[in-house]
Amino acid sequence: MKVLFQTLRSLVGLFLLMRMLALQAQTVPAAPVPGAPVPTTGSWVFTPAVASQYMFRGARLGGPAFEPSLEYDYGSLAVGVWNNTPLKDKVVGQSDPEFDFYGSYTIEVIKDTLSWQPGYTIYTYPNAKQADGFYKATYEPNLALNYTVAGVKFTPKIYYDLRLKGPTYELTAAYTVLFTEAKTELDFTATAGTFKWTSAAPDQINSLGQPSDVKNYGNYWLIGVSAPFQVTGDSKLSIGWAYTKGSDNFVKVGTDGKVPNSAAVGRGVMTVSYTRTF
């Protein structure tokens, strides 16, 4: 936890520095977007994307992948599905392919400043086999608090996976620098998190030949930037890069000693996406 708190403190300091440099460069920081009335009809958002690596909470789950998503928004409600289809370096049963069904509802407390956001994600792996140590599905409700101050949006968030039996605690900070003449912006994001799951995989046989729970716990962080470019009035192209790393990530089977998780690594991830709203 000490390492996590040090990482959080460093990320907050980095965002304050970025904001100061942006002001000195006379760029315009992102102002909260004025609240719009709840639409009487919803909208669909389709986003095909390609990523150079598949990283999840500091663990590498695969190489280059196609990652499309489809979301339906109606006022404060959002529901959607996200897919990962590996193109190379497949992890059998884990991300070959993966379909995640998610939803959230935003409850505004202070206009453009403070809101609650309960949500859920159902992670599904159609080709996963329990005999290989994978679940076909996991279920994770979550609750986020969004707080914006001085143009920086802070989002502490808690998840609890009902299948993996454990929480994830996460803090994200986001800041946008506008470039009006270039008609684009830079969206900076930083995240730090920690998790502890007591049933991270179906029971395995320990060194004594006994079926045992599989525990997995660790920390992770990410820092990245993306730039969107408007293509038409209802579509845009985005290019992003992020570096993410897992640390103090261990797997423990029953009473056996803990073993470092070889999937917890540091990697740079490049993404290219096209978003169409209709």
Image (tube, rainbow, N blue to C red):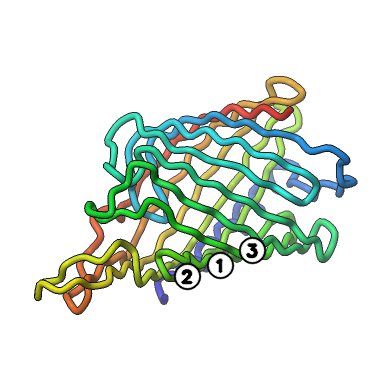
Q: Could you give the CA–CA distance between mark 3 and mark 1, rounded to whole angstroms?
A: 7 Å
User: Do the CB atoms of the residues marked 3 and 1 lie less than 8 Å apart?
Assistant: yes
Q: Could you give the CA–CA distance between mark 3 and mark 2, rounded to whole angstroms?
A: 13 Å
Q: Residue at x 63, y 51 (%)?
A: 103
Question: Mark 1 = which residue?
Answer: 158
Q: Earlier in the sequence, mark 2 or mark 1?
A: 1
Q: Could you give the CA–CA distance between mark 2 and mark 1, rounded to whole angstroms?
A: 7 Å
Please tell me how many numbered marks the rendered image carries: 3
Picture disc at residue 167: 2
User: Do the CB atoms of the residues marked 2 and 1 lie less than 8 Å apart?
Assistant: yes
Quadrant position of the N terminus in the picture: bottom left
Judged left or right of residue 169, residue 265 is left
Question: Mark 3 = which residue?
Answer: 144
Q: Residue at x 86, y 47 (%)?
A: 34
Above or below residue 167? Residue 183 is: above
User: Could you say which quadrant of the image residue 144 lies in?
Assistant: bottom right
Judged left or right of residue 111, residue 66 is left
Amino acid carrying label 3: it is Ala
User: Do the CB atoms of the residues marked 3 and 2 lie less than 8 Å apart?
Assistant: no
Circle 1 packing at 10 Å, graded few (<14), some (14-19), many (20+), is some
Q: Dot 1 lies on which element?
A: strand
Q: Position of residue 49 (x, y in %)?
A: 51, 31
Q: Position of residue 33 (x, y in %)?
A: 81, 46
Amino acid carrying label 2: it is Pro
